[in-house]
Amino acid sequence: MSQEKKPRKLDQVVVAVLANRLDSIVREMTNTLFRTGRSAILNTAKDFSCSIVTADNQLLSSADGLPIHVLGGGRQTESMQEFHPDLAAGDAYLHNDPYLGNTHTADHTILVPVFVGGRHMFTVAAKAHQADCGNSDPSTYMPFAKDVYQEGGLNFPCVRIQRDYEDVGDIIRMCRRRIRVPEVWYGDYLAALGAARIGERRLQALVERYGAETIATFVREWLDYSERRMTHAIKSLPAGKLVAEGRHDSLPGLPHGVPVKVKVEVDPGEGLVTVDLRDNIDCVAVGVNLSQTCATAGALIGVLNCIDPSVPRNEGSFRRIRILLKENCVVGIPRFPASTSMATSNVTNRLINATQRAFSMLGDGYGLAEGAASMGAGFGVVSGLDRRHGNEPYVNQMVIGNNGGPGAPGCDGWVTYCMPDAAASVMVDSAEIIEQKYPLLIRSLRLVEDSGGAGRFRGGPAGEIVYGPLHDPMTVAYFAEMHEDPPKGTRGGGAGCRSEVTRISREGREEPLPPIGLVELQPGEFIRGRESGGGGYGNPLERDPNRVRHDVLEGWISLPAARSTYGVILQEGSLDVDSAATSALRRELAGQRS
């Protein structure tokens, strides 16, 4: 590095330029991984995240990363520094241990410490969901695993995978031996590593340009500014002590499911939000326990969904959100060897939903309804042998289903929502690309009428997909949670529809399948999956009749539902709103429902 530059005065313009430069570095990392990842879960669905963490383990920038991946990510870099006091330039670490700061075993994180002039200034992270992680079943999700031993996945507690920019061959060989699709894994590893190295070089160039002291001063100023923004946002909320509960569907040994209780205190005077998760049950003997990172991130996501979105999402703003956890808790800090195989999804999504719905108790205009979170057939993990490629094995999670987003105080639920933990981040797979990559046929894909929860602003509709194998048997692992307890509406809004999974025989007969399961389909058979619809926000009778008309024209609401649920009468033929008849019907329905 050249001689240290004289510290530059930081004004608002320079701070804004540097903050956006950090985000652009993260986006370049993201584009690198997206374009070079080998598995469809990465290069089509984009189930990965990149971020920049400070040398003292504070999340600084995550741009468009998945919230569940990046919030709380500083705990992984703590492990890196604890286990490797000899950090050096050229190092890279593989970390997927859910007890040491990672989300769950399926998320492989590449950590690269960034040194400038011999000084450790940042760590860049590239976290990617794997096509396969070595589990005993061909799936990265093990909902029925009693502990980590029954999961069977490879665990890397922040191990060095590169030294002086060269691979550590022992680690590479372990992954190649135990992972069902070794070439896919290695391609994804190189993609994540390449993204991290891009981040490393861009940060070094940034410090070279502005000087280490200027950048260090900026980091302090940016985090402090973010804290001030969050304080201001919280001070604009009403005070309240709120309690909301949710419930994960039943599981083996848990006939009443997994209850989730959230206590939220909004203190505008102090500019502080406290989320207390300690009043929850102990860890359970199935794979839905949350890692500490997922419990933290789930609570943060629920709060941030209800906060001014212009507030920067980094460790500075998180200082004003206090999350209380306890050990050996299903929504807290797991005790080894409790399984956290599904920590990023099922119970986490119940936690997010309960938290954001709690905020709606502050009054009309606050909070959200519950978003749908089924991972049924549309999010299934498909596996088998591909005769088109010499009977090589394939494993991949599809992200082509559709869960309905939650109704909000000012807008309808998002149609292409995915689910609460990954909303606005994961992309919907292309049916054509999936059919090219894997030996299956997608027979139909559609949105389901009357599936979103009714409301002044309705929940997003659910999607339905039908697919099956082309030539040879195919295994589908699916997790259609929200079959028993669908997404709740709020402030008078209705619930979304339940998830469902069925098998279609060669003869066309249809039989129900368990909501969560692993099924082998024979050629000529198909699986049909319907995800869930989002909950509605507010009284359906207050919905703008023209919005109801629009939904009827789109096929999202039926004519009978427009009349019976929303009290809207559309004229025959033109489907224009009959305003006088609608007003009269709404008065009648309001009297019946009061």
Image (spheres, rainbow, N blue to C red):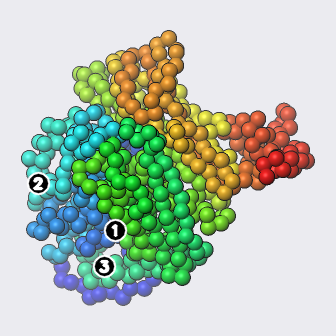
Front residue of this view, candidates 361 and 411: 361
Camera sees residue 436 = no
Q: Which one is earlier in the sequence, the residue at label 2 or at label 1?
A: 1
**Depicted 54 relative to depicted 174: above or below:** below
Q: How far from the left and from the top, in percent, is residue 223?
A: 39, 77
> For residue 30, what is the image quadrant?
bottom left
Q: Evaluate if marks 2 and 3 touch, with contact meaning CB atoms under 8 Å apart.
A: no
Q: How far from the left and from the top, in percent, is residue 272?
A: 48, 76
- Residue where numbered disc 2 is placed: 166
Helix, strand or loop at mark 2 = strand
Measure the C-alpha gap from mark 2 to mark 3.
29 Å
Q: How many residues crowd around disc 1 within 10 Å: few (fewer than 14), some, or many (20 or more)?
A: many
Helix, strand or loop at mark 1 = strand
Marks 2, 1: nearer the viewer: 1
Seen at 42% across and 71% down, the residue is 322
Is the N terminus in the top left, top right, bottom left or bottom right quadrant? bottom left
Going by the numbered disc 3, the residue's amino acid type is: Ile
Q: How far from the left and from the top, in percent, is residue 537?
A: 65, 54
- Residue where numbered disc 3 is placed: 215
Q: Evaluate if marks 2 and 1 touch, with contact meaning CB atoms under 8 Å apart.
A: no
